[in-house]
Image (spheres, helix red, strand yellow):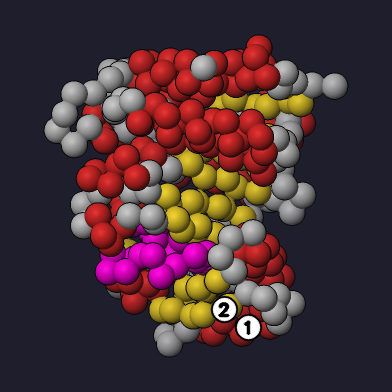
Amino acid sequence: MSTKIAILPGDGIGPEIINEAVKVLECLQQDHALDVELETAAIGGAAYDESGSPLPESTLNLCKSAEAILLGAVGGPQYESLERELRPEKGLLGLRSELELFSNLRPAILYPQLANASSLKPEIVSGLDIMIVRELTGGIYFGQPRGIRTLDNGEKEGYNTLVYAEHEIERIARSAFDVAMKRGKKVCSVDKANVLEVSELWREVMVRVSKEYPEVELSHMYVDNASMQLVKWPKQFDVMVTKNMFGDILSDTAAMLTGSIGMLPSASLDKNGKGMYEPIHGSAPDIAGTNKANPLATILSVSMMLRYSLNKTELADRIEQAVSDVLDQGMRTEDIADGGSFVSTQEMGDAVVNALKA
């Protein structure tokens, strides 16, 4: 029986980069007997334009029935005036919450061919291979109460709630330790335990769960220091685990160590390994429709999907090797061209497919 994959192009450059990722999936179907069924649906601004909701019931039902989800990007300036509940990002947040995709894996890997694209010295970033594990369905992005209210003196006040229960911390801790067991067996937990009670509990639970993994070395770092260390000495890290907002920020910092945010995929997993896969970059409305976007992060998201949700490790390896081969050939999109010549979104996707067929 075919494995169902939900394809959600979304907004901005989303449809362009998803097209290239679908080419890769279709190549694997034709040449490597990958038995999958692809079904497309709208999310984010595109869904709002169609139905008045950033997460239509039909899209949610498709995603619930699929084994994995491939997402492009959501958002755009034309939607910023909408009520918060109708904005494209609410579609993405709603999907994460409804499917309980609590564990976000964001690798930061520097391809040796792109060492010069990093803004840091090659000796600092060469050989970089970090996995950031971000808690995705709790914390300040979801905490209640939240809102904007008017005080008695007429002044407006905005408020949000940062809250984590023990079971939420335990499951993201286990996710991080499980990943570390397959890597360098080091976990750095990032918190702000010197000023936040939530982080005190976070650290306490991390220590407790670490006793179930005696082979893994656990360390702790305050988030401000972690952001500095990522730039100063990134290769000290193997797996970093942190709460939702800290992970949002640190993973983007780590992305730029690699030279371009356009190179990095991500996986968001539930407790059973079902996942949503997406590039970590946004919808880039400034270049949408120009055929300039880098599709490699989306193509590498397909590789992560094959590895973590479909258990097709050999095919995942093939995609990653094809991307490396294309970079060896000197193919670059504008974001990683380092001032040299560059190819279009479509040309880069075609090059990866050709490398897969070689």
Q: Main secondary structure of the magenta part?
A: helix
Left or right relative to 42: residue 236: left
Q: Quadrant of residue 164?
A: bottom right
Query: Whole-percent x and y of residue 156?
Result: 32, 64
Q: Which residue lies at the image location 69% right of the left edge and 71% below the top edge? A: 170
Instruction: Name the residue beneath numbered marker 2.
Output: 218
Residue position marked by numbered label 1 in the rendering? 207
SS at mark 2 in the image: strand
What distance separates the C-alpha of mark 2 from that of mark 1? 8 Å
The residue segment tinted magenta is 230-254
Amino acid at circle 1: Val
Q: Position of residue 273 (x, y in %)?
A: 72, 47
Does residue 301 appear anywhere in the picture?
yes
Three-letter amino acid code at disc 2?
Leu
The picture places residue 104, in percent across and down from the top left corner, at 56, 53
Tell me the tag on residue 136: none
Give x and y (percent) for residue 199.
Answer: 52, 79
